Each structure stands twice: as structure tokens, then as C-alpha cells.
């Protein structure tokens, strides 16, 4: 029998920061997925940031292995060390990572990822509720797998029943009626592997028959731009004429131009202190703070101009790149 391969599905990562498809995430194949791929007679390849899953087909053009309904787990590992700084965070708990799946529709990733806590084998679970005694119940697909009770001196519990890689639901139940739900994801190969998130795809009959292309869309982090303009002694008229205009909104496709409010010292919490900007106290300082946030872009946004007395002093003020943790900039002006 001749064996050929055809596409089961592809996954392309698209990031607003890059302005389109990118290779910012590597797809990590854990042990559980390697076992499933072997049983499916399937291969995984990654080319230019795109994940390809290929299935073997025989002379009758039918899959050699059992493919429909199989679930494949992948880790999402950032290639760029600054990935988290330019990627918009999901609304997740402090211990959670985003999990992207095609649970709602076979042919599309869910609109929002869900948060899961990623663990290795036999994870040590620290409850979120402080009450004792505290009951812990773990279920998977609606079936109860484990039930434990923590006493007054118990700080944690070891979940030993999660032998299969996948998602589990942990419910904490206190005697006073308070409860807390958590999602655990057990995958020993991925735990501690630097995964930013998880991708779990279930192959449908349609994927097996004709293949399918998935897109993982990621939004860029938005920042409130702040420009501190430090001016060498100048007249009040010159100083008062300094302002910022946004002339790049149309070209960037950003909608309405961003307006800036003028703030004089003191600037308030969360902003740079005037003493830090001018230790000698010999300069005039004004802060221009954007009234709306601007999404980060690898190239741009553009067109934020610094003006004085009708003259453009700086045509493109600096923007936060991937490596910056905030969007605060200091501009020094010396009056000629």
C-alpha cells in the first residue's frame, strides 16, 4: 500500500503588534500529543511560524489511522523575550495561562481563551480558600475523580489521580458554604517548559476529509502615552505654545486622532517625579498625557508631532517598542 500525506489542519499565529501573520510563538509537542500522533499515523511540521498537522492516507484516499475526534495538545512558547510586554493580557488569574481551543465550533478557535493552571504529574495543590476544614473535589468530563478534605494543619494536597494529560476541574468547598472553582491542566512535558499558553485542537470529520486552516489571533497591548517635555529657560509664551498633535491616525488606520492633555507639575501618582527629570530645578517641565490608549505596533504608530510656535520640532515622537515596559518618554528642548 502506498502511503501519502494530506493536511489535517494548519494553525497560523496573527498578532496585531506585527500587523499580520508572524512566528512569535513556537509550537511545543508534548509526550501525550506525540503518542496520539503516532496512533493517528500523523506528522507535525512547523514552517515559517505555521503549524502543519499531516495525516497518512492509503490507496483508497482514506486515513490510515483513526483521526476523527482525536485531541491534540500543543504548548505555545514565545520566541521573543519581550512577547508578554507587547501582547494584550487575557483576563486570567495569577496562576493561569490562556488555553485556546475549538470547543464551541469545530472550525474556529473560541473567541476568548480560558484560564488554566498548568501542572506536571501529581501536582501539589495550594487552595485559594483559607477556611478549614476544606473539601476538594476534582472532576473530568463531569465524572468525579478525587475527593479530599484538608484539616486545620493542611496547607496543600497532592492530586495523584490525574494520570492522563488534559484538563480537570477543581472545586474547593468550605463548611460555611463558600466555594471556588479552578481549572487544572496536567501535562508533565509542558509544565516548567516556559509555555505562555496552550492550544488544544479536536479533529473533526470535516478536518479529516478536507483539512482546515485555523488562525490564532492575538491583540497588542495598549498604552497611555506620556511625554515629559523638559525645556531650558524660555519665555512663558514659548513654553505655553508647546503642544502635541496627532497627524498619523488616518495613515495608521487608528480612527480618530489622539488628543493630549497638558499637565503641569506636580504630576501625581504613576508618573515621573519632576525632581527626577530636573534635579537642579532650573528647567520648565510639562507633561503631555494621551486621553486615550494607543495599541503598540512593531512599526509605528506614527505622526505624533511636537510643535512650538507653529513649528514642528519633532515629526515622529518615540513609541513604545517591544522591549519597553511602559510608554513614558522624556524630551529635552533647548531654545536656540
Image (tube, rainbow, N blue to C red):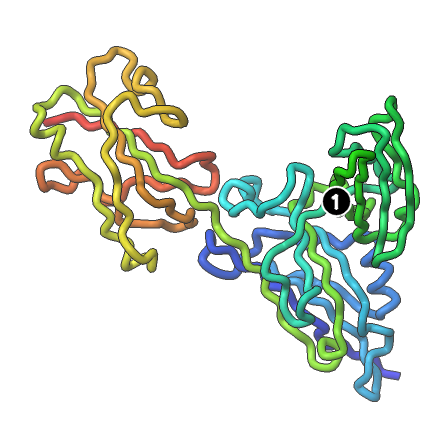
Task: Using the rendered image of the protein, determine whether residue 20 is visible from the camera's viewpoint.
Answer: yes
Q: Quadrant of residue 51?
A: bottom right
Q: Is mark 1 on a helix, strand or loop?
A: strand
Q: Looking at the picture, how far across and down is residue 275, in whole percent? A: 31, 15
Q: Quadrant of residue 60?
A: bottom right
Vertical position of residue 281 compared to residue 211: above or below: above
Residue sticking out furthest to the top? 280
Query: Is 86 positioned to the left or the right of 305 in the image?
Result: right
Residue sticking out furthest to the front? 176
Q: Looking at the picture, how far across and down is residue 1, in whole percent? A: 89, 84
- For disc 1, the marked residue is 181
Vertical position of residue 146 compared to residue 13: above or below: above
Instruction: Quadrant for the C terminus, please.
Output: top left
Q: Quadrant of residue 266?
A: top left
Q: Which residue is drawn at 11% across and 23% down?
A: 234
Q: Looking at the picture, how far across and down is residue 22, in whole percent? A: 53, 57
Query: Is 51 positioned to the left or the right of 82 in the image?
Result: right
Q: Which residue is drawn at 65% across and 45% down?
A: 196
Query: Is 104 positioned to the left or the right of 36 in the image?
Result: left
Q: Residue at x 78, y 48 (%)?
A: 185
Vertical position of residue 40 compared to residue 270: above or below: below
Query: Is 55 positioned to the left or the right of 157 in the image?
Result: left
Q: Which residue is drawn at 72% across and 63% down?
A: 201
Task: Using the rendered image of the protein, determine whether residue 76 is visible from the camera's viewpoint.
Answer: no
Amino acid at each position: 500500500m502506498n502511503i501519502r500525506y494530506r493536511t489535517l489542519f494548519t494553525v497560523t499565529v496573527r498578532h496585531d503588534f506585527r500587523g499580520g501573520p508572524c512566528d512569535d510563538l513556537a509550537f511545543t509537542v508534548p509526550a501525550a500529543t506525540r503518542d496520539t500522533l503516532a496512533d493517528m499515523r500523523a506528522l507535525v511540521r512547523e514552517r515559517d511560524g505555521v503549524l502543519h498537522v499531516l495525516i497518512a492516507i492509503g490507496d483508497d484516499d482514506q486515513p490510515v489511522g483513526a483521526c476523527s475526534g482525536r485531541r491534540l495538545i500543543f504548548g505555545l512558547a514565545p520566541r521573543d523575550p519581550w512577547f508578554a510586554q507587547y501582547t494584550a493580557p487575557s483576563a486570567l488569574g495569577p496562576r493561569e495561562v490562556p488555553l485556546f481551543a475549538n470547543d464551541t465550533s469545530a472550525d474556529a478557535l473560541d473567541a476568548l481563551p480560558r484560564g488554566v493552571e498548568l501542572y506536571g504529574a501529581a501536582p501539589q495543590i495550594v487552595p485559594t480558600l483559607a477556611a478549614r476544614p476544606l473539601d476538594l473535589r476534582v472532576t473530568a468530563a463531569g465524572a468525579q475523580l478525587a475527593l479530599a478534605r484538608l484539616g486545620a494543619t493542611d496547607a496543600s494536597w497532592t492530586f495523584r489521580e490525574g494520570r492522563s494529560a488534559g484538563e480537570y476541574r477543581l472545586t474547593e468547598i468550605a463548611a460555611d458554604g463558600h466555594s471556588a472553582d479552578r481549572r487544572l491542566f496536567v501535562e508533565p512535558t509542558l509544565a516548567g517548559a516556559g509555555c505562555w499558553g496552550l492550544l488544544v485542537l479536536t479533529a473533526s470529520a470535516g478536518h479529516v476529509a478536507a483539512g482546515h486552516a485555523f488562525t490564532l489571533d492575538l491583540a497588542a497591548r495598549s498604552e497611555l502615552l506620556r511625554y515629559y517635555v523638559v525645556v531650558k529657560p524660555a519665555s512663558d509664551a514659548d513654553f505655553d505654545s508647546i503642544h502635541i498633535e496627532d497627524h498619523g491616525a488616518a495613515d495608521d488606520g487608528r480612527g480618530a486622532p489622539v488628543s493630549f492633555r497638558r499637565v503641569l507639575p506636580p504630576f501625581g501618582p504613576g508618573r515621573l517625579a519632576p525632581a527626577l527629570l530636573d534635579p537642579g530645578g532650573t528647567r520648565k517641565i510639562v507633561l503631555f498625557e494621551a486621553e486615550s490608549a494607543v495599541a503598540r505596533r512593531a512599526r509605528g504608530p506614527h505622526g505624533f508631532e511636537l510643535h512650538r510656535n507653529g513649528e514642528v520640532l519633532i515629526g515622529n515622537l518615540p513609541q513604545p517598542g517591544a522591549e519597553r515596559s511602559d510608554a513614558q518618554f522624556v524630551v529635552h528642548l533647548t531654545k536656540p
